[in-house]
Amino acid sequence: MYTAPTLDFFGQLNLGVALPALAVMFGSMIVLLMGLFVPRERRHSVPIAALSLISAGFIMTLFTFNPPDAEAFGGMYRGDAFANMLNLIVLATAFLAILGSTDYLRMTQINHPEYYTLLLLSTSGAMIMAGANDLLLIFIALELLSIPLYVLAAFRTTDGTPTDEVSSKSQESGIKYFILGAFSSAFFVYGAALVYGATGTTNLNAVAEAVQGLAAAGDFGTAGTLLLLGAALILVGLGFKVAAVPFHMWTPDVYEGSPTPVTAFMSVAAKAGGFASLLRIVAVGLAALAVRPEEAAAWQPAFQLVAILTLVLGNVVALAQNNLKRMLAYSSIAHAGYILMAVAAVGSAPLVEGIGDSAAQSILIYLAAYMFTNLGAFAVVSAVEREDGSGVMLDDLNGLFNTRPWLAVAMAIFMLSLTGIPLTAGFIGKYLVINAAVQAGLIALAVVGVLTSVVSAFYYMRVIVNMFLRSEAEGVALPVVGQPLLVAVYASMAGTLVLGILPTLLTGLVNLVQLV
Amino acid sequence: MSFELILFLALAGLAVLFAVGMLLSENAVHSALFLIGNFGCVAVLYLMLEAPFIGMVQIAVYAGAIMVLFLFVIMLLGAEQTTDTTRRFRWLTGAATVLAASFFSAIVAPIVLGGVVLPTPVQQGAMVRFVHAAGIPNDQAVNLTVSGGSLSEPLVLSDLNFGDVSPFFQLEAGTYNALVQTVDGAPVMPPAQFRVEDGTTGAASVIVFGEFNLDRGTFPMLSLLPQDFTPTAHNSARVLIFNAFGDPSLGLADLGPNQVVDTRRRSALDENGEPVVDDNGQPVQITTMDDPLLVPFTGAFTLSQPATVPSGTSAYALVDEQFNVVKPLFDFNLAQSNEHLIIVAPDYLQFGAGPGRYRPTVLRDPNLSIQLSAPFGSPASIGQVLFTDYLLPVNVVGMLLLVALVGVVVLTRPDTEKQDRRIVRRRKVSRPLTSVISTQTGGSITDEAPKLPQPQSND
Amino acid sequence: MNFSVPTEAFIVLSMVLFVLGAMGVMLRKNAIIVFMSVEMMLNAANLAFVAFARQWMHLEGQVFVFFVMTVAAAEVAVGLALIVAIFRNRNSTNIDALHQMEG
């Protein structure tokens, strides 16, 4: 039944918990205006403003990290510890990406201030996705996350080559990302329609109640079928965003063609936002969707299959790559597979107590580790990349230790972390994710995860071998690495090592996460 | 085969035909026009689905803005002739068809064959509020305690004075007990029970508690008066009368400009139209009103049928069956799209030391009129919801549109910096001719290689 | 509640349109036609939403449709800008010609 809402609603808005996301969203307008009116000599103030906005958002998030009353906007947004932890991850991603962008943009002559506005708006989209508790808000925030990325992927409109090769690659990646992204969000909307049809609501908490009502009645019936189909379509829609197989086709081309700092941001932020929403949908909304009570969720086998395919394909095809950016793209697909392992583990919620929360915590730590590692790796790539886009083949890294030793050491640490070697952040993340899968009883999945980790060592080690044991090519000058980029590389390296050696710094925060 | 079913089948068939035409057409403009036709069919389907606002927005935004933008771009690029009539890979077509068929059958088959029952809304409880309409001697405030039913702890409303209306409470269906006490705790009347049924769409109920009086006999202590949020026509209000006063049946009459009840006496007529004659042979005279009563006579302790009256501020009167004015209501505002509950309650008046008496009073609390919802699917209803429940999505969508604006400008603006750089490069080439020629004929390629001036192709 | 046209009929229609749109995206090569097919898919999802909104007598479905339309408009603007930018370079809207990156 619907009744006319009262104006009393405005007293219940609870803006405080949504403040970080909203502040970044509205603050980016100030950055936009700055970019318009600042004279060309002082254009460097725009990224500084962007960085300060991100820092402000970071501090605001820390202030209200685990509020007792997290529901805002009438149940649409939940600013709980999960959302705030993800806010921290996404804000750090944006910070490091902007640090890595300034010199890159100047070098490739695309130093437009709108870049920072689009990046900030995409960040705010990811932050809202993290806390969105309603399918409508998830969809809108998904679009707010993606559309700036479509534009940013095609940002290279000029280049130094006579044939416009790099800019046409950039445009091609932009349009591929765009078409497949629009395709996938149509799937998401249809899935949301089916969920709405089965339960009469799009609020995830209300969906959870309806699902429990179904499970208690033991009558799977039409509503259950519709829900299951809706869940499948939502998985398709969000699966595109996080590059799960078989929705990964766009990833190598888009990662290769986009400007490198955009790729860095996209690889972490899109995954963070996409997985946050996917996790919330399955953990809060659909966790109890089982055919019979006290059974694992009906969607778990499908998720398991997707996770296995993603792990296998990502790791195996990466072995054959010669282009560093494409290799990192396939590695990104593989890492999406690891996170999908933990998402599939949530399906055992009717059987195992508390698996939803432990899976969520493991995913958050994995994302934090992945953020430091991947951003660092892409920062090193943009340090060696030349203006015309060359210099990113694996062979171009030969002898990097001789020419730029610190970059080589940092890259080595990032590669080790991506493999999952102990003492690096990647190991902690992988351990927790595999632990969650084992806790949920998905032993086969965990075994596949471990095996593919071993396989991945081959192509990560190849990078290290190239840097340390081969000698560099003759007469090729590496571009000068600017200060902000160096700061980004060192900060990522520090983050990777600190998270790997002293994980308790982060686990204290993450243990507050209570998703269900 | 009702008209709606035929209309639906026609529109559905047309929509599918347009869609197929869009897919198979070789001319991009034809495809766009087919898609506009498809959108138009879907817009009419929205009208059938009680979504008039969405239907009009579909035509204005989808067909009118988005497709026009498509057509502009097609014309700008001159891309009418599409060159992909040949199939790329046969297997891809086959795979796509198989995928489509399996998806389709996975959903349609259970629906069509299985006799599927889509879930329907479950009615839940009702919203209840409490009105103090009891004339109690000494005019004291009372406390009302409601317990039982689905309440985990008793609901206490304290310090209710005559004429107070409490806010709405959501109560599940069930039987509840109500206890009315003075502020000191002495019971005013014996405890009573009332029953809440599962409400219909948007039902709200008002419970009136009245006191019994030895002179007037007992009357119901608690009456549950169902109210309704269903929308009413434009510029009208809905009025209900609850007669808690007792004996004379009361109706609501419009007083008109001269502020009296226009009555006249005429002969009574029986069912054949013949004048009724009393025992002495004299025709019986009755008093009638020319204009019909706005709300027909409502007996003692009953709730009248809801009546729709034109809204506005006017003078009304409560009249008894002989059309005597029992209580005039001057400057009474009937707000439009509201449902007004007029409760005629016995107010206990005492003058001096003598016994008091009861006087009919109309409770004037503005909360007795409830705001009706706008009709389902109307712009007003969607507007009501958008700026309260959906405030955050509206704001985020606003930022999304800003992103689209910035993105379009960034992607399509002419590259003035590139032109500037070409000019700069040309200016740098001010060396003597011989060195220019020698650099042109070989040597190492540096970043500063002079280029011959190019015709400006980017405008 | 009994409607003269059952809700299932609308869902079947929206399914048909959705699948047609998906096939259009997969099979056509012209970027503009592909994009129009995506719009048709979104339209089909909107139809499902409005049908379910009437089934449940709840406005939430219609509000969702309102937002989807707005988002679709923003997407169309950005997408067509991308297509225009590419077309300026290549003089063709055939997305099969976009195969510079192989591997």
Image: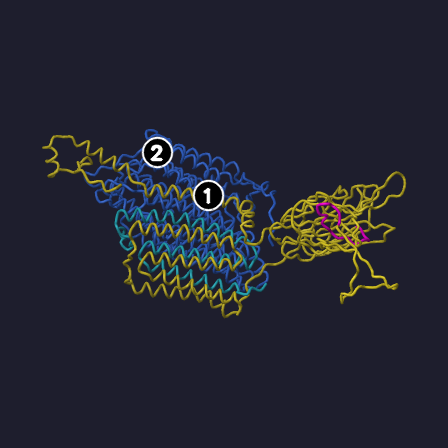
Chain colours: A blue, B yellow, C cyan
Residue at the spot x=41%, y=63% of the render? B16
Extreme-front residue of the structure: B282
Q: Nearer the viewer, residue A379 or A223?
A: A223
Q: Could you say which quadrant of the image residue A212 lies in?
A: bottom right
Of badges 2 and 1, nearer the viewer stands 1
Q: Position of residue A123 (x, y in %)?
A: 42, 42
Q: Secondary structure at mark 2?
A: helix
Give the side of residue B4 with respect to residue A118, left or right: right
Q: Label 2: chain?
A: A
In the picture, the disc for residue A191 is: none
Is residue A516 visible in the rendered structure shown here? no
Magenta region includes residue B63: no
Q: How many marks?
A: 2
Residue range of the region highlighted in magenta in the rendering = B245-261
* Spatial separation of the CA atoms under disc 2 and disc 1: 33 Å
Q: Label 1: chain?
A: B
Q: Amino acid at mark 1?
A: Gly
Q: How would you classify the magenta stretch by its main secondary structure?
A: loop
Q: Position of residue A442 (x, y in %)?
A: 46, 57
Q: Amino acid at mark 2?
A: Pro
Residue at the spot x=64%, y=56% of the render? B124
Give the side of residue B177 with respect to residue B403, left or right: right
Q: Position of residue B115 (x, y in %)?
A: 53, 69
Residue labelled with disc 1: B398
Q: Secondary structure at mark 1?
A: helix
Residue labelled with disc 2: A484
Answer few, some or many: residues within 10 Å of disc 2's Cα (few below 14, many 20 plus, some between 14 and 19).
some
Q: Could you say which quadrant of the image residue B41 lies in?
A: bottom left
Q: Is residue B71 above or below residue A93?
A: below
Q: Is residue A72 above or below residue B124?
A: above
Magenta region includes residue B255: yes
